[in-house]
Amino acid sequence: MEAKNSVRREFIFPPYLLLLFPAVVFMLLMYAYPFIASFTRSLIDAEGNFSFANYAKTWELYLKDILFTFAVTVFSTAATGVMAVLLAVYLRFSQSFISKILSGLYKVPIFIPFVVVAQMMNSFLAPHGLLNIALAKFGLINIDQPLQLFNFTGLSFGFIWKMIPFSVLIIHGGFQMIDDSYIEAARTAGARLFKVITKILIPMSKSSIMVALVLVYSQIVGTFTLPYMLIGGKSPTTITVDIAHRVNYFRDFGVANTLGVFSYFLVLFTAIYYLRSSVRKMAEDKLVQE
Amino acid sequence: MQKRNRFTILLLVSILVTGLVLVGGKKDEAAAQEAKVRLVYMTAGDVNMLALGQNVVGPEFSKKYPNISLMTIHTGPGNAGSQIIFEKLLAESESKKDVWDVDVAMVHQIFMKWAMEKDLLMPYAKDIDTWKYVASPFAKSSLGVNVEGYVMPMFHSQTALAYNPEFVKDPPQSYEDLVKWVDKNPGKFGYNGIKGGMSGVSFTVGWIYWKSGKYEKYAVTGPFEESEVASWKSAFEDLAKFNKKVTFTGGNVGTLDALNRGEIWMGPVWVDMFFTFMNEGKLNPKTKMVLPEPGMPGQPMYFVIPKKAAHPEEAKKFVEFMTSPAIQAKDIVERFNWYPGIDGSYLKGSIPQDTYAKIYGDVTPEDLSKKGRAFPLADYFNAILESYEKWVK
C-alpha cells in the first residue's frame, strides 16, 4: 500500500525495476521485433524497394481467403461461446453422477494437439468417414451422397470441438465464483433458470466469458494444421495455409508478411479489448485497495 | 522452509553432476573423433529421409567404412526443407570460412537453381565410380539449370493417376479422356489442389503441358516469356470447370485415403507413397495406376557436396555407396519404393523379380521415359501456381 501511495505522489525510479530488464528485453526481442519486422517487410517488394505491391497481390489473390478466415473464426468463436456457457451452466448446477464424470472428461480435448485433432476430423468427417457411415446406418443419409464436410462446416466443427473445453474451463471457473446466495435470492423471487443464466450468471462473469472468447478467437485465427489438413487444397482456404503456400513454393516472404499483417488486423480489436479490460480491472482493484 | 532448502541443494547437486557427466562425455567423444571422421549429412524431404539416413544407410555405411560415421540432419519436407539447406550453405559462404560444416546434402530440384547461382557446390559427380550408371536426363539439367557434374540423383519419384479397377474398368489414357470420364462420373475424381501437397501441383502442371503442348519450352529449353502466361487463361478456366466436378482431398495422403475408403475412384498420387501405403496395408491391394498422355511430372532428389566441405573425399565415398546398384536395389527400390536414381537396367539382377514387376507393372520403364515429365523451369513453375490462384476460382 505504502509503495503504491508514494508512486502516486512523486515518481522515484526504484532500483528493483531493473529486475524487469531481462523480461522487457526478452519481450522486445522475441515479440516486438518480429512484429515490427513483418510489418515493415510487407511494404518491401521483391526488388527491395518500398511499395504496396505485396498488398495489391494479396488483395487480388487472397481477399476471399481473408474474408473466409474471418467468417470461420467469428462463427466458431460465437458457437463455442454459446455451447461453453450452456455446458458450464450444466456443470455449475448439476450434482449428478453424469455431471461428475463429464466434468473430468470434458477437459480431454485441451490436451490433444491440433495436428491430432486434424487427423481425427479427417477420418471422422470424410465422405465415407465415421460420421457419414453412422448416419447412413441409421438411414439418415445415402452413403452415395454423403455429407460433404471438408469445408466451412467441417472446419468450424473441428474448431468448436477443440475449443469448447478450454472455454468451459475458464467460464465454469467464473460461475463457481458466484455465491449461491445470489442465485437462491433470484429463485426465491421467482426467476426461472433462463433468467438466472441471463441476469445473474452471465453478467456476473462477463469478464471471464470475454477472456475465454478473446483467447479462442485469436487461437483460431492463427491455427494452421487443422485447415491445412482439412481444406488445404480448396479455395477459399485460411490465411495460415496461404502463408505456408507463399513461403514453401515461392519463397515470397513479402506477400507472406502481408497476409500476416491482415491476420494481425483480425485479432487487433480483440487484443485491444483484452488490454483495456485488464487495465480497467487493475484500476478497479486499486480503488478497492484504497 | 527446510523442505525448500533441501530441494535447492538437490537441484544444485544434480546440475553439477549433469555438468560433470557432459564434460566427461565430451572428452570421450573428442578422443573418438581423432580416429573417426564424422560426416555431416543434411537431408530435405519427408521424415522417411531421416529414417533412411539415420537408421538404414548410416549404420550400413559405417560398417563398410568403420572410420566414418554419418550424422544425419533433417530439415523438413518440400522445397522449404531444401531452402533451409540453401540458407545454411549461403551463410557459410558469406562468412568466408575456409571449411564448411555440411559435408553432403540431399536436395530438391529447385535448390540447384538457388545454389548454382551463388556458386555453393563442388563439381564431383564425374569423379566417382557410379557416374557411369547414371542415364537420367535429370542428372544433366534441373528445372532448366545445367547441373551436369554437380549432382547424383539418389532416386526418382513419379506422379501418376491411381484408380480403383472395381469401378474404373477402362481407365482414361490421357488428360483428354480423363475430362470426359469426369463428366460421366462427377465427384469420383479427387485431387488436392495446389496448396495441399505436390501430387495436386503435379496434376495441375500436367494439365498445362497438355493444354499448351509446350512441354519442351516450359521445362527444357525456355526462355521464360510473360506472354506465355497470358495464354494459359482459357486452360485454367477449363480447369476451373473441371474442378466443379471433382472432389478435393486433404493432401497427398488425403487422396490415397479417399481412394481407399471408396470416396473417389481415381486421383493423382506419388508412386512411392502408393506402394508404401500398399505395403503397409493402408490401400486396397487391387488399386492400380496409369500415367496419362501427354505425361505427368516427377522429380529426382539429388546428392550435392558443398564447395568447401570439410571431408570431400569421405562425402564422395558416401555418395558412391548410396548410388551403387546394391544399395539402390535394396534400400531405394525395395525398402522405400522409389524408382532408382541410376539406370534401372543395372538393378535387374539385384532386385527380386516380383519387386521389379511390381514397381514397373502399371507404369512401365517405357511409360516413364516417354511420359515421365520434369517440373517446369522455376519461372514457369511459379507462374503456373500463381495463375491457378488467379484464374481458378
Image: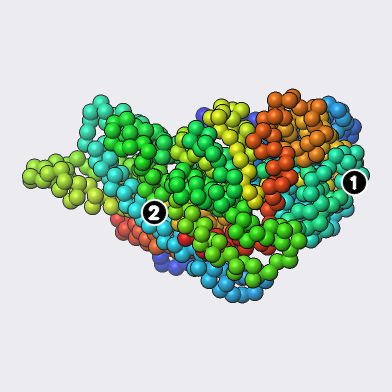
Q: A49 or B178: nearer the eye?
A: B178
Crowding at mark 1 (Cα within 10 Å: few <14, some 14-19, many 20+): some
The image quadrant that residue A69 belongs to is: bottom left
Give the residue displayed 73% in from the left and 39% down from the top.
B365
In which quarter of the view is residue A36 placed?
A: bottom right
Q: Nearer the viewer, mark 2 or mark 1?
A: 1
Residue at (29% x, 44% y) in the render: A83
Q: Mark on residue A3?
A: none
Q: Is residue B210 left or right of residue B39?
A: left
What residue is shown with label 1?
A: B126
* Residue A251 appears in the figure: no
SS assignment at label 2: helix
On the image, numbered disc 2 is attached to which residue?
A: A72
Residue type at numbered disc 1: Lys
Disc 2 crowd, CA 10 A, few/some/many (<14, 14-19, 20+): many
Determine whether label 2 and label 1 are within 8 Å by CB. no
